[in-house]
């Protein structure tokens, strides 16, 4: 073997093995200047703040959000829908006829043609009313037949399907997941074999599949099917195994079986199975036609980077807004030990965490969708958005359950928390399970997609271009020293002299410098570590996860600054902005600190210790948000003013009284308005020696007798008390009404 061959073999051994599907995934998306600059240690603040600027919602989009979406929400009763196990027929009809299922389809075919941000705003608002309706609307507007056809379909296919999909005459589902291929979608066992129909001589595909967890499958009329295509006779001229392919098949096709429903956490949205055995379909069923045979995986990955940025982050953002509002309101209404529970520091801590995470989730979601609307296919940002939006959504729901306690755990029409608590684990598991997304995708793929030399190096080695590979390897080595030098420069504070951040509002400049520090430190550690690990990086999941956490929180903190600046640097938002950034910086720093621990770092301490010093990754430089900031946030939100309004602006509020959230809103507003009357009541109590545990009506009557309250003031105070009691009380059921469950006596 020649020296050149040995050299190339050595270089190849350093490169991680990449399958065809992995390579297609790496090639499919794009890299923006936001995540690219954060990864490479030099945040591009002009791109972060001023790049990829979103357009305002069109008049049609704004009208749809404010009218049709509101009207749909009015039709929804969360408890009744989940008890019935389906949306009412009139709701299904409204969703279809008003074009909720065709928001991404072009107006040319009767669709709405909405931007990604507008579609997200619709889904988020519906999700604050009912998750089943939100999922029903969400799925056809993310990864599915409508999106695949819009991007890749032939004109014939578009003409055949898009108009009917836009208005719900056809309902789509997309079948990818199988019993043995969930997150490992590249190993799906569904198979299609190109052959001639023995009856007609027509060339087609004989399909066999067994799919599960398919949302909308039980009601679908059009099935998008992903499968491995084989062509043993090479009838298509693309070899014997073209690869993963996507076909669009009417569910009325002979042999197509729509199986039974699944019950995801007993929620009512349609989800189920589909199977088929030797189902013969024509070649024109392949999305994009026969020439797209074997190109299905790339199509799916490109669409997934857009759809994943929209769907589940919208649910996570909705969960945060809804839970922060209801928890803040409840903690103001609910009293213990003679004071609203919002005044307890433990409660304040959880409300502030909810608010900070909710602001961060909205910023994360919208920044990523703005990339989509600008034409990017943001593979890494969409993975970050999916993982962290659902995880932060889960935390806000858990905090709400903790604070609202008995109100949150007793099932019934008055429980407004249960659906989100049940639904959020579903969001965690789908579209790439969160464990996989964190441990393997964000940094595992991100390092090869975002690093300026990894992919070119791999390509040069594969093509056996020795000189080119050597030149890239030299630049790769040089980049390590650049990374370390930048880290020292930035962490010594010298970048402040050359980059004053004058384009940012005054309160954000220091945070931007701190993001610069963590970004430079991250790159100084990640660059040499991943370069030396090479092929082993793929299996160093714990390290990959920690690097991914650091990159994610840098992206989130930058998105928060972007949102604050683009929304006019409104001071009402500042406490929540500060919490969100400080929380993200703390988590980013801690994750990087954890990577460099002796028992975690996968390489020698001869490298670990110098990296720790040169990257400035020691101690706890970026502290958690303070207790004082937590109390400031809770106080601001509980006043029900601009801060809470801006934080929850995508939330639906019922127009009429009645319903648990409407009752909560009335009691919340009444409690704030009655604060002065409460003070008078306490004054009267002290004069008479009454205790807070006396009957409320007796205390009010006593205050009237003493002249502390007028008759009208007493009526107002009693009305507020009755509203509070409607909120605090929970449902109770007779033995006969308790769903037939056995009663232990």
Image: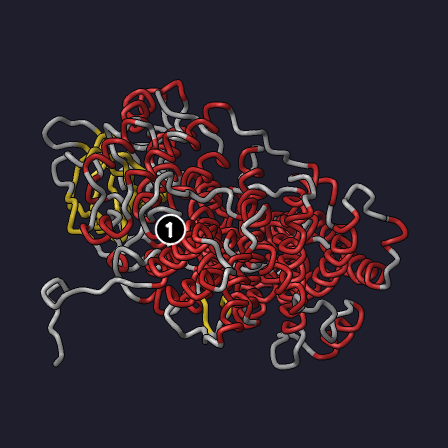
The local secondary structure at tag 1 comes to helix
> Above or below — where is 239 with respect to 389?
above
Q: Position of residue 587 (x, y in %)?
A: 62, 66
Give the image quarter of residue 419. bottom left
- Looking at the image, which residue is at 23% across and 27% down? 169
Give the image quarter of residue 3. bottom right
Q: What residue would you read off at disc 1? A: 661
Q: Position of residue 649 (x, y in %)?
A: 51, 43
Q: Is residue 584 visible?
A: yes
Nearer to us in this view, 579 or 312: 579
- Looking at the image, which residue is at 75% across and 52% down? 512
Q: Position of residue 641 (x, y in %)?
A: 57, 48
> Above or below — where is 347 with respect to 231?
below
Nearer to us in this view, 369 or 415: 415
Q: Quadrant of the C terminus?
A: bottom left
Q: Position of residue 625 (x, y in %)?
A: 66, 66
> Above or below — where is 512 with respect to 72?
below
- Looking at the image, which residue is at 43% across and 26% down? 113
């Amino acid at each position: 073997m020649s020296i050149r061959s040995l050299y190339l073999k050595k270089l190849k051994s350093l490169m991680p093995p990449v399958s065809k599907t992995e390579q297609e995934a790496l090639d499919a998306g794009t890299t923006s200047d936001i995540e690219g600059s954060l990864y490479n240690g030099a945040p591009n603040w002009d791109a972060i703040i001023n790049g990829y600027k979103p357009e305002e919602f069109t008049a049609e989009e704004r009208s749809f959000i404010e009218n049709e979406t509101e009207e749909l929400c009015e039709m929804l009763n969360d408890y009744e829908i989940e008890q019935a196990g389906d949306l009412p027929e009139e709701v299904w009809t409204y969703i279809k006829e008003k074009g909720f299922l065709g928001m991404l389809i072009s107006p040319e075919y009767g669709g709405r043609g909405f931007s990604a941000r507008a579609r997200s705003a619709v889904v988020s608002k519906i999700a604050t009313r009912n998750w089943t309706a939100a999922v029903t609307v969400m799925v056809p507007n993310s990864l599915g037949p409508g999106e695949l056809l819009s991007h890749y379909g032939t004109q014939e296919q578009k003409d055949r399907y898009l108009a009917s999909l836009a208005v719900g005459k056809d309902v789509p589902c997309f079948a990818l997941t199988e019993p043995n291929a969930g997150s490992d979608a590249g190993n799906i066992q569904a198979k299609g074999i190109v052959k001639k129909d023995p009856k007609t001589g027509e060339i087609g595909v004989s399909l066999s599949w067994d799919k599960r967890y398919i949302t909308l499958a039980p009601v679908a009329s059009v099935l998008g099917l992903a499968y491995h295509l084989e062509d043993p006779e090479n009838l298509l001229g693309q070899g014997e195994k073209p690869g993963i392919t996507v076909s669009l098949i009417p569910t009325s096709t002979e042999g197509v079986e729509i199986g039974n429903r699944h019950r995801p956490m007993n929620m009512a949205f349609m989800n189920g199975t589909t199977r088929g055995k030797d189902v013969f379909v024509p070649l024109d069923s392949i999305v994009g036609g026969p020439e797209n045979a074997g190109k299905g995986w790339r199509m799916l990955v490109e669409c997934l980077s857009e759809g994943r940025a929209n769907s589940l982050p919208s649910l996570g953002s909705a969960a945060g807004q809804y839970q922060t509002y209801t928890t803040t309101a409840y903690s103001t209404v609910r009293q213990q030990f003679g004071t609203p529970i919002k005044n307890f520091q433990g409660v304040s801590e959880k409300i502030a965490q909810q608010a900070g995470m909710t602001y961060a989730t909205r910023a994360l979601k919208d920044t990523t969708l703005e990339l989509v609307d600008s034409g990017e296919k943001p593979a890494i940002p969409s993975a970050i958005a999916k993982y962290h939006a659902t995880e932060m959504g889960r935390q806000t729901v858990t905090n709400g359950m903790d604070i609202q306690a008995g109100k949150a755990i007793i099932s019934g029409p008055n429980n407004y928390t249960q659906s989100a608590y049940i639904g959020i684990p579903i969001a965690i598991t789908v579209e790439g399970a969160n464990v996989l997304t964190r441990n393997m995708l964000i940094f595992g793929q991100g390092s090869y997609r975002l690093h300026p030399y990894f992919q070119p190096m791999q390509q040069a080695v594969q093509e056996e271009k020795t000189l080119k590979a050597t030149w890239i390897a030299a630049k790769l080595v040089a980049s390590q020293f650049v990374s370390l030098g930048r880290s020292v420069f930035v962490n010594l504070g010298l970048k402040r002299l050359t980059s004053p951040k004058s384009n940012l509002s005054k309160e954000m400049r220091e945070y931007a410098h701190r993001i610069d520090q963590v970004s430079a430190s991250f790159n100084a550690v990640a660059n040499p570590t991943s370069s030396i690990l090479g092929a082993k990086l793929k299996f160093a999941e714990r390290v990959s996860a920690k690097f991914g956490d650091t990159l994610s929180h840098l992206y989130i903190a930058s998105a928060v600054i972007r949102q604050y600046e683009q929304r006019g640097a409104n001071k009402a938002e500042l406490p929540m902005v500060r919490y969100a950034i400080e929380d993200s910086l703390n988590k980013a720093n801690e994750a990087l600190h954890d990577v460099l621990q002796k028992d975690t770092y996968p390489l020698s301490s001869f490298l670990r210790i110098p990296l720790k010093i040169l990257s400035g990754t020691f101690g706890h430089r970026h502290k958690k948000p303070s207790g004082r900031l937590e109390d400031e946030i809770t106080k601001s939100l509980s006043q029900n003013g601009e801060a809470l309004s801006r934080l929850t602006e995508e939330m639906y509020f019922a127009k009429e009284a009645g319903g648990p959230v409407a009752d909560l809103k009335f009691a919340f507003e009444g409690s704030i308005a009655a604060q002065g009357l409460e003070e008078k009541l306490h004054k009267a109590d002290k004069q008479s020696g009454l205790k807070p545990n006396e009957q409320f009506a007796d205390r009010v009557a006593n205050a009237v007798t003493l002249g502390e309250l007028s008759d009208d003031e007493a009526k107002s105070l009693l009305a507020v008390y009755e509203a509070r009691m409607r909120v605090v009380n929970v449902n109770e059921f007779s033995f006969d009404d308790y769903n037939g469950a056995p009663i232990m006596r």
